[in-house]
């Protein structure tokens, strides 16, 4: 039989059927993700304190709104963390060593990682892991142009689930978890997550991670309730997403953004507050809201240096150093895991 060349009708139909299989697989994965989203929303809205997990903020609109939040004058965490990373880039580069692979958890627009890649000695690979797939892939395409020598391996996944890293080179594996996204977990879940990150990265790895520190309540509350209403739009976009993707009937204007510091828990809480008595339906599920009742959408814990140290130790990491910005508002920790590195 003649070998199949790319020009034969065989190859054409083979390619078409492969593309169709791929589309079917992608559709099934998307249907599966939507079913999980629906289950999480129905479960969350059935609790005495209604809640939706913050990972659902990040559809394409949510990811774009988060980028705008990072540029707000009130939103100090991005500026403070960038300042620390710029100042400490050379030390982070030395910690990583030659030909290291950088694995970023919740990479967003992959802006901060540039400071690390610039400081590293011939970085081998960059593996961003993010739940917001199209936004991540667009960011990685921009990064690939600037760093042609670095293998870009984006992974669209929920980083709390089992994540299998692609085969990486011989250099050290360095995790990067900026933005104080760790603060979205309760302390217990944060410790478990850090242990999970250690398992994903393996023995001998390092982790560079950002923590937002406790500070004046007015500064904290302004950062999560800016005067231009961008954070409000980010929070309310969750309801638009739930309407679109799981067929709910939240009325635009039926809820408003609320953010406040809960001193007992040392966390900012974001909620969506019902402005009137109302009912919301998802298929056969009906959810009654009293006026003033809220959906809890996010926690953002604020840490002390002592709390960071205790948590990372519990999770099996050794804290090599904790850097802060001059105001002491934000901290970046460099952590190491014992064992033979790869
Ligand atoms: C607070 S933003 C931080 C973005 C960026 N790292 C920074 O420092 O500006 C959180 C990022 O994590 C992603 N994310 C949130 N929950 C996630 C999850 N469970 N799995 C994967 N990515 C997640 C979001 O899509 C978003 O890009």
Image (cartoon, grey):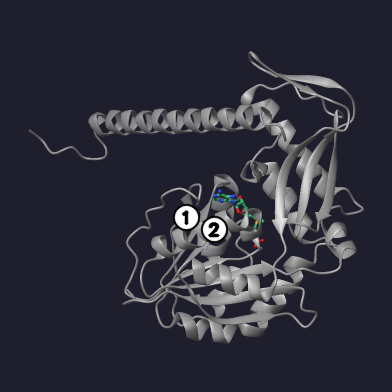
Q: Which residue does the image show at 77% across and 43% down from the upper left? A: 235
| Residue at point 53%, 70% (across, down) | 312
**Of residues 86 and 263, the one drawn nearer to the viewer in this rendering:** 263
> In whole angstroms, how far apart are the C-alphas of marks 2 and 1?
7 Å
**Does residue 210 lie above or below 241 as drawn?**
below
> What residue did someone put label 1 on?
154
**SS for tag 2?**
helix
Front-lying residue, 244 or 284 = 284
| Residue 269 position in % (x across, y down) | 77, 50
Give the number of callouts. Answer: 2
> Dot 2: within a 10 Å radius of its alpha carbon, few (fewer than 14), some, or many (20 or more) residues?
many
Mark 2 sits near ligand 1, with its Cβ under 8 Å away? no
Give the residue furthest to the right.
227
Of residues 96 and 20, the one nearer the viewer is 96
Q: Is mark 1 on a helix, strand or loop?
A: loop
The percent coordinates of residue 90 (x first, y second) are 57, 86
Residue at the top extreme, as displayed: 284
Badge 2 is on which residue? 140
- Asked if residue 106 shows in the view, the reply is no
Residue at the image point whose x is 67% and y is 84% from the top: 87
Quarter of the figure that contains the N terminus: top left
Badge 1: few (under 14), some or many (20 or more) residues near its Cα, within 10 Å?
Answer: many
- Is 290 rendered above or below residue 124? above
Q: Which residue lies furthest to the left in this view?
A: 1
Locate residue 202 relative to residue 320 in the image: left or right: left
In primary-sequence order, the first of circles 2 and 1 is 2
**Are the residues flagged by discs 2 and 1 in contact, CB closer than 8 Å?**
yes
- Nearest to the observer: residue 14 or residue 317: 317
Can you tell which of label 2 and label 1 is closer to the viewer? 1
């Amino acid at each position: 039989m003649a070998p199949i060349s790319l020009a034969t009708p065989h190859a054409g139909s083979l390619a078409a059927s492969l593309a169709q299989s791929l589309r079917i697989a992608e559709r099934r994965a998307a249907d599966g993700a939507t079913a999980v989203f629906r289950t999480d929303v129905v479960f969350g809205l059935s609790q005495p304190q209604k809640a939706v997990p913050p990972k659902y903020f990040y559809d394409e609109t949510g990811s774009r709104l988060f980028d705008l939040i990072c540029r707000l004058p009130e939103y100090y965490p991005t500026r403070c963390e960038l300042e620390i990373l710029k100042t400490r880039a050379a030390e982070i580069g030395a910690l990583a060593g030659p030909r290291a692979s950088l694995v970023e958890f919740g990479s967003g627009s992959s802006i901060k990682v540039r400071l690390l890649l610039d400081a590293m000695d011939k970085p081998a690979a960059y593996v961003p892991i993010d739940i917001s797939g199209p936004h991540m892939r667009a960011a990685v395409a921009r990064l690939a142009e600037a760093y042609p020598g670095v293998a870009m391996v984006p992974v669209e996944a929920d980083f709390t689930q089992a994540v299998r890293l692609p085969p990486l080179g011989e250099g050290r594996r360095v995790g990067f978890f900026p933005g104080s996204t760790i603060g979205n977990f309760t302390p217990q879940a944060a410790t478990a997550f850090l242990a999970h990150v250690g398992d994903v990265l393996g023995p001998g790895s390092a982790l560079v991670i950002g923590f937002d520190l406790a500070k004046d309540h007015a500064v904290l509350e302004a950062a999560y309730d800016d005067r231009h209403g961008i954070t409000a739009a980010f929070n309310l976009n969750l309801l638009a997403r739930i309407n679109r993707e799981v067929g709910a009937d939240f009325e635009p204007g039926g809820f408003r953004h609320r953010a406040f510091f809960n001193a007992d828990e040392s966390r900012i809480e974001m909620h969506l507050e019902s402005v009137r008595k109302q009912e919301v339906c998802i298929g056969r599920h009906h959810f009654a809201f009293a006026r003033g009742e809220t959906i809890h959408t996010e926690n953002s814990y604020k840490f002390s240096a002592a709390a960071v140290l205790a948590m990372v130790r519990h999770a099996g990491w050794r804290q090599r150093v904790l850097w802060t910005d001059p105001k002491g508002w934000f901290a970046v920790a460099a952590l190491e895991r014992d064992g033979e590195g790869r």
